[in-house]
Amino acid sequence: MTGKSHSATEGDRLLISVARHDWMWLAGLGAGSLALAGAALLLPAALGRTVDAAVARSGSGVWVAACALLILVFAVSEAATALAIGIASANATARLRRYLSAHALSVGHRLPERGGDTVSRIVGSAPAAGGGPASLVVSVAAAIPPVGALVALGLIDPWLAVSFVLVFPALIGMLRHLARDSSQIAVDYSRVQGAITARLLDALAGARTIAAAGTQGFERRRVLALLPELRGHGYANWRVQARAAAQSTIIAPVLQVVVVAVAGLELSRHHLTPGGLTAASQYAVLATGIGATTAMVARLGVARGGARRVAELLAVPAPEYGTLTNPAGTEDPPQGNTSYRGRHRKPRKDGIDGKHGELALQGVTVRRGGQSVLRDLDLVVPGGAAVAIVGKSGAGKSTLAELAGRLADPDEGTIRLGGTELRRLTRAALRESVVYAFERPFPFGATPAEAIGFGASPLAVPEITTAAEAAAASTFIERLPRGYDTALDGAPLSGGEMQRLGLARAFARAADARLLVLDDATSSLDTVTEMLVSRTVTERLRGRTRLIVAHRATTAARADLVAWLDEGRIRALAPHDRLWRDPYYRSLFGVEAEIPATGERC
């Protein structure tokens, strides 16, 4: 099965799943559609009987009343189906968006595509797919009048049905091609639209850099470069619609003319009454009601295309978690010299987490874009130790940091914390055991207090302020107009200040952690601030294992050990002063290569 056909199959299954959840409204829609189709089928017969009764001058009033009743049923059913279509589609769209949003957040940065495309699928493709079940019901119901009209023609006179059937296959072929082409065009259009959205979001995120570099024109061309392709898919859609309309313009009148001509011939031979001719002409129009059918088929094709896009996102597996609630099966988390949480804790006898905080990577291989970022890597980070990860650009430092807390999973190999494989931990236990600080932290929350306290469990005000002091963030926060309650939108922060907020959040959660991962989290700090933060890392967090992605020699010098990454493997694991003797190691730090190998040690 090809990739496209597999994607189409998954999209169709998704539509069926959505239909099951809204079966009540869809059942109501089906009932209304059947009533609508029934009224449409009975009305020509009633009109024919009315004509015959009028010609015979007997009982025409009854048939006139019957026609009026059928028209009333038609109007009420049409209003009811419109309401059911709207509610069923809205419910399905809301459900898909909730499900997609939750799935995207669960998968997180593991999504293979950029955020703009994901947003496009949630905002654009979900409504298209949400309307699929209702479109399917209406499309099936829309097929009833033409089929019923064909049967009615046969009952009026067999030759009428024969004449219609001779031309009808052309109509079926047109509808089939319309459904197939519109579905694929909808997928291609949404894909390009998502790519444009992704480029636009990238440009907006880097607006200051673009302005400083004077590359607005280049970025504008880059964002809009895909517009011709988008326009091409749009034109293709209109060409398909125009071809279908042109074909229906030819086929429908031909069918009607053929049926009416045969009916007239049968009338002249006295095989048909005037009322039969009237009914036959109406049934010919009904049987060739290609306009409504074409619109429904086209809408169903768009829905299938949207469902394919949604199914592709849902096909990205979310990480599965285990059932263990504590690494190494211990009752208490590791204890350092200071707790930011303010709760009484039972200190460990040895004062250091030891084996309970040991991080062990064995045979780890990670592939990205067909290339091996890490290859058969083995690394043991002793419990309670501070290990700096160094290496040239692209060596896999951030990838290794992601693996340590299972922000990513290796393609091969195992990762254990305190002897327990990370996959066996529950989500809550994993996130409590491993705390991160990033190079570019995102300040979730409206104020500095909310940004520092962001997490699964709430923090008290003293815990937030203590963590801010430990991260040297309290100095600039207290200068803000409302201190910790200042709106971040009205107080733009520098890169270093943002890093300090991220560090404060990590320090506030570190009391319950076994492993603290700093992914180049001090790169924007000045020397004095970095020394203050390092004091927190070296003194207050000594009981926790610390993994530090380092680009500065001073940072590596303060670590107990340095893990030197080279071509996806650990080239050396040793103290910084011993590695400093190697000129290749010194070259990793560029202009900092002359910095003395001594420094404050963890």
Image: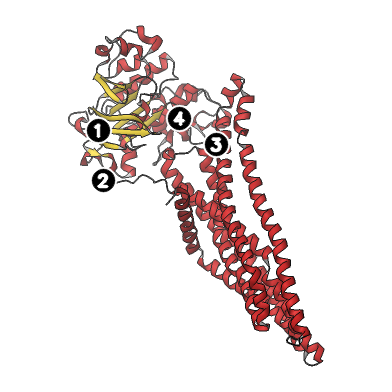
Q: Nearer the viewer, mark 1 or mark 2?
A: 1
- The structure residue drawn at horizontal position 48% and vertical position 61%, both measured from the top left corner, is 16
Is residue 254 left or right of 104 when viewed as pictured?
A: right
Residue at which label 4 appears: 441
- The structure residue drawn at horizontal position 21% and vertical position 37%, both measured from the top left corner, is 419
Give the Cα distance between marks 4 and 3: 20 Å
Mark with earlier residue (4, 2): 2
Which quarter of the image is occupied by the C terminus? top left
Q: What residue type is labelled 2?
A: Leu
Q: Is residue 146 visible?
A: yes
Give the Cα distance between marks 1 and 2: 23 Å
Residue at which label 1 appears: 363
Q: Looking at the rendered structure, which numbered label has been put on residue 324?
A: 2
Q: Nearer the viewer, mark 4 or mark 3?
A: 3
Mark 3 nearby-residue class (10 Å; few <14, some 14–19, many ≥20): many
Dot 4: element: loop
Residue 93, given in percent of the width and then of the height, sits at 55, 55
Query: Residue 228 appears in which quarter of the rendering?
Result: top right
Residue at which label 3 appears: 198
Mark 2 nearby-residue class (10 Å; few <14, some 14–19, many ≥20): some
Mark with earlier residue (2, 3): 3
Dot 3: element: helix
Dot 2: element: loop
Please tell me which residue lies in front, 280 or 549.
Answer: 280
Give the Cα distance between marks 3 and 1: 35 Å
Q: Which amino acid does label 1 sit on?
A: Gly
User: Contact (CB < 8 A) between labels 2 and 3?
Assistant: no
Query: Residue 369 appears in which quarter of the rendering?
Result: top left
User: Contact (CB < 8 A) between labels 1 and 2?
Assistant: no
Q: Nearer the viewer, mark 2 or mark 3?
A: 3
Is residue 180 left or right of 234 when viewed as pictured?
A: left
